[in-house]
Image (tube, rainbow, N blue to C red):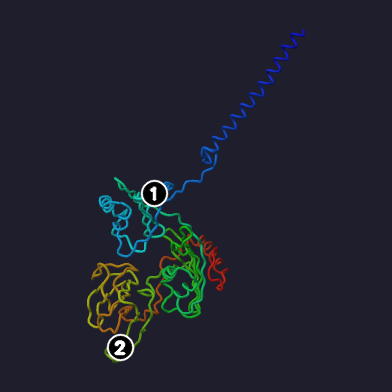
Amino acid sequence: MKKSLIIAGVVIFGLIAGYFIFKNVKQYQAHNLNKVELADTLSVDSTGLQLPPPKILYGINVDSLEVYEGVVQRNENLANILSKFNVGAQVINKIGNLPREIFDVRKIQSRKPFTIIHDKDSMKTARYFIYQPNPIDYVMVKLGDSVIANPGKNRVDTLFQTLTGTIEYSLYQTVVDHEASPLLVNNLSDVYAWEIDFFGLQKGDQFKVFYEEYEVKGQPAGIGPIKAAWFYHMGEEFFAVPYDQGEGLEFFDEEGKSLRKTFLKAPLKYSRISSGFSNSRLHPVLKIRRPHHGVDYAAPRGTPVVAVGDGVVTKAKYSGGAGNMVKIKHNSNYETAYLHLWKYGPDIRGGVRVKQGQVIGYVGSTGLSTGPHLDFRFYKNGSAVDPLKIDPPSANPIKEEEMANYKKVRDYWVNQLNEISIKKAQEVI
């Protein structure tokens, strides 16, 4: 009996000891398993200290390399840049033979940034060359026996901005005074080109606009499209509501009429009217009074002149006092003429069809002219009319089947625009 109790005690003790040994082994395994997982997850060294994450630039681990950032200097070319980083003529020639649609070394421009990733030694041999023609795009060239170029794009952050203003001198000056991009002036002009003559803006005119602005690494990288806008000009409100009814995005007014008209309001951008339509004007060269059936736009020599509407060029040649002139027949009723041009646009000649907004020439001072300007003339049924008083019909109004949906979009943007105070110059929404 006593012997049986002793045996039983030994068995029980063994079981208890085995349990604790097994438990400790499992805990040890679990503890070490966690260490392995931790090492894989947090990247620790042999001492168990956590290592900093690798530095990645343009998808390259540059921990064992050095990074040089520079700007292309005036009259500097690719050979000048890379020769400072132990890149030989053979490799540079290979870069020059890369497909031009990927990287054209001839188009490297001064003041554009570049990055060179090179070895950490006294030779500083370049391994990668990255060129940025603009803040968004870049091309990365891998250097070595094989030269490979890959285009890429930086991450672009899109901000939705609001700008409002009251005209004091010009739209351009107002936008710049509010520290917004001057490119916004171009975009607003494009939206309202058929409704508002931006040469005729008056002090006290007002505007509101929603638009996109781009940033790369916290730095401005241009602006995107206008989302919606409002202009107050000559005592009238002009809403610009975006809508796509299957023919591409266009802007419409509150009634669903397209802001795109048959004719543009003006054939060139950002100038001033130096002389208006008149039946009796003192000619600046001849010093006699005679009709001036056009509008003179003073502008620098070389300013692009565009067709105000679709049509066929009926004349593109030197025409005495009118100098180099282009004449366009738009339809059976309307014709326009562009006088005193410096030279003609690409492929502009008699019989060529042109599209609205196409460059047909450049401001000059040919013929009887005292300085660079465009004399723009508009004819209706063969008779000259004042271009500033033309009210052409709208193109592509909202279709009947789209009107209900358009009204929802219109109401949203009109409400958004109405909620903005003119006193607020700029804000992020």
The residue positioned farthest toward the front in the image shown:
122
Q: Position of residue 292 (x, y in %)?
A: 32, 85
Q: Is residue 81 left or right of residue 412?
A: left
At x 66% / y 22%, what residue is drawn?
A: 19
Image coordinates of residue 154 in percent, x first then y, are: 43, 54
Q: Relative to 238, is 91 on the left or the right?
A: left
Is residue 98 among the parts visible in the rendering?
no
The answer to which image quadrant residue 330 occupies is: bottom left
Q: Is residue 28 visible?
A: yes
Q: In the depicted view, which residue is nearer to us: 139 or 187?
A: 139
Residue 120 is tagged as 1
The extreme bottom residue here reads: 288
Which of label 2 and label 1 is nearer to you?
1
Residue at label 2? 284
Q: Residue at x 51, y 60 (%)?
A: 405
**Residue 337 placement: quadrant:** bottom left
* Amino acid under disc 1: Lys
Residue type at tag 2: Pro
Where residue 224 sits in the image (x, y, percent)? Answer: 45, 62
Check disc 1: other Cα within 10 Å, few if <14, some if 14-19, many if 20+: some
118 or 310: nearer the viewer: 118
- In the image, 141 versus 387, the foreground residue is 141
Give whichever of discs 2 and 1 has the lower sequence position. 1
